[in-house]
Amino acid sequence: MTSISAIMVSWHTGPVLFDAIKAVLADPDITELVLIDHENPPAVRKMLDDLARDQTRLRIVRTNKNLGFGRGCNIGAAHAKSDFLFFINPDAEPDTGAARRLVAALPPGEITAIAGARILGTDGREQSGSRRRELTLWRAFATFSGLARLGLARPFGMENDALPEAPLRVGAVSGAAFVMAKPGFDQLGGFDEGYFLHVEDIDLCRRASSVWFVPDAIVRHVGGTSGASRFAVELEKARSFLRYFWKFNTGAAGRMTTIVAAPFLFTAIMLRALISEITGLLRR
């Protein structure tokens, strides 16, 4: 029988954390939920402890420090006891059966393959990042600068493409909800812990043998619940993107291209954050 360990990393997630836990534990296909507690508030920790006493499939692993998403996932994977790992955000609620459908979509014999869920926002629409093309410097810049919305370049995200009827091979999926065989995750060395937040999922997809978007594996994602500064989050995202391109654009030409593009990409990401912040203030 296939066993699945759900891995969840939480840092000041907010009340939605318990909705996410409830949704995961409501799925009988989930063998266990390993929750990495990155220094949540004392009141939240007490609630988690109380819940773990009632829910035998819930295991709490405490780090007492925010070690970042990738490292937290690696810690969770090391504690997992199942054949497959289901990485799920602490503000995401998987439909019953989603994890099983993801496991079923993994190609036989491909130990390092990844299968990602169709992630829906609170409006019921597929979220950006749910399925993605291969990441390039140009696609990243075109997406963050708005050029892709003007039709001047193909965007990184594929959420506006026609929905496939069966699992579709893609360049990358979101780290908010995906499945991988535990031996394959271990073989790849897990997430690159050099990323603190963002892009570590794209990096892992880059190293996988194949990546699949599974349209009938539904996960509902609230998102943005940590209360962290939008600019701090976007700054970390910019750093992570630059790390990714420096890592994979090897050779003299690749490194030079990254150096030249870095200020433009950084500015595009931070400017988008500024525009979003101003728009939010005007709507209040």
Image: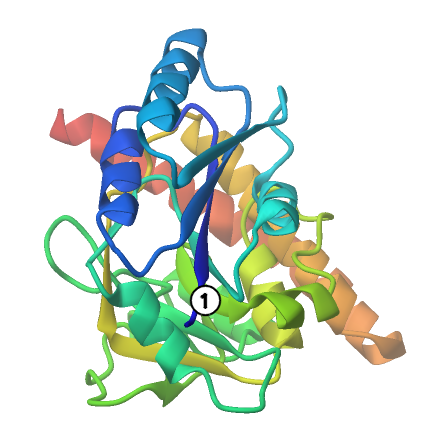
Residue 258 in view of the camera: no
Horizontal and vertical percent position of residue 228: 43, 26
Specify the farthest residue to the right.
Answer: 252
Residue 244 in view of the camera: yes
Horizontal and vertical percent position of residue 233: 49, 36
State the residue at coordinates (64%, 72%).
184
Q: Nearer the viewer, residue 268 or 190?
A: 190
Count of marks placed on residues: 1
Asked if 89 appears above or below 86 in the picture, the reply is above
Q: Nearer the viewer, residue 215 or 127?
A: 215
Instruction: Look at the image and tell me in which quarter the N terminus lies.
Output: bottom left
Write down the quadrant of residue 22 in the picture.
Answer: top left
Specify the farthest residue to the top.
Answer: 42
State the residue at coordinates (29%, 69%).
149
Horizontal and vertical percent position of residue 191: 65, 56
Q: Left or right: where does residue 51 sit relative to residue 122?
A: right
Colour basis: rainbow
Q: Left or right: where does residue 188 sit relative to residue 208?
A: right
Q: Left or right: where does residue 203 sit relative to residue 252?
A: left
Give the amino acid type for the residue marked by disc 1 in the picture: Val
Asked if 20 appears above or below 109 in the picture, the reply is above
Horizontal and vertical percent position of residue 84: 50, 66
Instruction: Look at the image and tell me in which quarter the C terminus lies.
Output: top left
Q: Nearer the viewer, residue 177 or 102?
A: 102
Asked if 210 appears above or below 259 in the picture, the reply is below
State the residue at coordinates (39%, 41%).
57
State the residue at coordinates (37%, 23%).
53
Residue corresponding to mark 1? 179
| Label 1: how many Cα within 10 Å (few below 14, some 14–19, many 20+) | many
Specify the farthest residue to the front.
Answer: 1
SS label for mark 1 = strand
Asked if 125 appears above or below 132 in the picture, the reply is above
